[in-house]
Image (cartoon, rainbow, N blue to C red):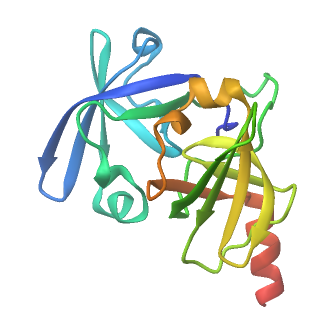
Amino acid sequence: MFTGIIEQLGTVQKIEKDGENVHFTMQSDFTDELKIDQSVAHSGCCLTVVKIDGSEYVVTAILETLRKTNLGTWKIGTKVNLERCMIMNGRLDGHIVQGHVDTTAKCTAIANEDGSWKYTFEYNTEDVTVEKGSITVNGTSLTVVDSTKSGFSVCIIPYTQEFTNFHTLEVGSTVNLEFDIIGKYVAKLFQK
């Protein structure tokens, strides 16, 4: 479980294909605190640490993960939002995040709002957002500003803009989405 509060940006150092799997070598400042078999959210996608070497560690994405996320677009040098799993006796500053990406979305607009930024996204699933509800974009816990049938917008404060990979997004960028876990269960109950 995660909170959606990004700890730091990591950088993709190496990408190796192994059959349908892809191994990503990541660099981060907290690598020395990691251990093999630990879960780390990478732009919202929970991946398991399989190797550690100095300030670098390796995680593996299987084909299902590559199909559901934007990991297949990563290149050497890509900046990735990183969050270690939450500690159960700590504060839940964001919202409950599983690290299970539901789908991807395209950024359709970025507006500078004189001190903040408004990002608009469109997606192609039947998942729903609600205004003032929670959404996770590239692993970042955010509040929905506007909600439509297949899209939403969020506003980003300067701290989030600087310390997450939001500053690397452009119109057309693909992001990972995890919809609110409670909202997903409520929607499924209403479908029945």
- Is residue 86 in view from this perspective? no
* Count of picture labels: 0
Q: Quadrant of residue 149?
A: bottom right
The x and y percentages for residue 129 are 76, 66
* 10 sits to left or right of 113: left
* Front residue of 155 and 95: 155
**What x and y, as percent, mark residue 17?**
14, 48
Instruction: Say if 122 sits above or below 5 in the image.
Output: below
Q: Residue pushed farthest right?
A: 132
Quadrant containing the N terminus is top right
Q: Position of residue 112 (x, y in %)?
A: 67, 41
Nearer to me, 169 or 24: 169
> Residue 45 location in percent, x, y?
48, 47
- Name the residue at the bottom extreme: 192
Residue drawn at x 73%, y 68% is 184
Quick check: can you spot residue 74?
yes
Which residue is painted at 52% across and 63% down in the image?
105
Q: Considering the image in quadrants, where does the C terminus appear?
A: bottom right
Taking the image as shown, residue 28 lies to the left or right of residue 120, namely: left
Note whether 156 is above or below 171 in the view shown. above
* Residue 43 against residue 176 in the figure, above or below: above
- Residue ID at (74%, 41%): 113
At 49% from the left edge and 53% from the top edge, which residue is drawn? 175
